[in-house]
Amino acid sequence: MTIDAIAEKATVSVPTVYAIFKSKTGILTALLDESMFGSDYEEIVRYAQSATDPETRLRRAAAVARQLRSAQSDAFELMRGAGVVAPELAKLERQRERLRYDREESVITSLKNSGKLRPGLNYQKARDIFWMLTGGEVYRMLVSERRWTPEQYESWLADTLVELLLANGHWRGRRDSNPRPLP
């Protein structure tokens, strides 16, 4: 993938591509942002954050992770298929992970502030566990490698987050009291 080829395919000049995106990484970032962080994402995040019950909030966070991972997986596979070089993808993935870590902080902060964080689990470890479990590698391993459905991943993730992060978090088989299909 070259800037010249992108410009030709878009029927614009090479300087126009550079003016809009600055670099190949800028193009990749725009593609990922569009596929992962669009209006559907913002809507489901607001829905997850609206939960006041810690268990419901974690279960809704699992739905956000499933949606994000599904979109990310598709976008990265498209880029790999288009011949995007590995160093650019690796850099972009690292940037996305830092952004995700920052965005997820509010979930653990809400658990801590509600007094529902599992005893013996400090804030930083809870945040790290949440980040790790909602990450793309876990999704890839279970969905792509082991052939779980995205729905099976979401259900497992919700139960696991509740079990590991909540005080008295033993899964009680309860689902979100206000289920809603994802957009």
Image: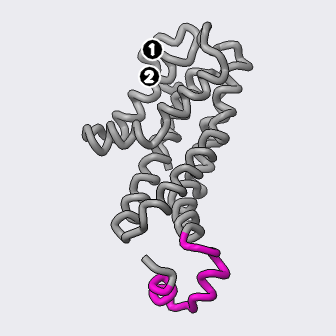
Instruction: Out of 142 and 47, give the one closest to the viewer.
Output: 142
- Rendered view: 44 above or below 165: below
In magenta stretch: residue 141: no
Q: Return the residue found at the far right.
A: 113
Instruction: Out of 25 and 170, give the one closest to the viewer.
Output: 25
Please name the residue shown 32% across and 37% down the image: 142
Q: Which class describes the residues within 10 Å of circle 1: few (<14), some (14-19), or many (20+)?
A: some
Q: Tell me if label 1 and label 2 are in contact, CB under 8 Å.
A: yes
Residue tagged by mark 1? Answer: 171
Q: In the rendered structure, which disc, 1 or 2, sits on the residue that comes first in sequence?
A: 2
Amino acid type at mark 2: Asp
Q: Position of residue 124 (x, y in %)?
A: 65, 24
Please name the residue shown 69% across and 25% down the image: 110
Judging from the image, what secondary structure is the residue with disc 1 in?
Answer: loop
In magenta stretch: residue 10: yes
Residue tagged by mark 2? Answer: 159
Question: Is the N terminus in the top left, top right, bottom left or bottom right quadrant?
Answer: bottom left
Amino acid type at mark 1: Trp
Please name the residue shown 37% across and 71% down the image: 82
- Rendered view: 32 above or below 174: below
User: Magenta segment, principal secondary structure?
Assistant: helix
Q: Position of residue 68 (x, y in %)?
A: 49, 47
**Is residue 133 left or right of 118 when viewed as pictured?**
left
Image: magenta residue range: 4-24
- Location of residue 168 by image quarter: top right
Please name the residue shown 48% across and 55% down the image: 90
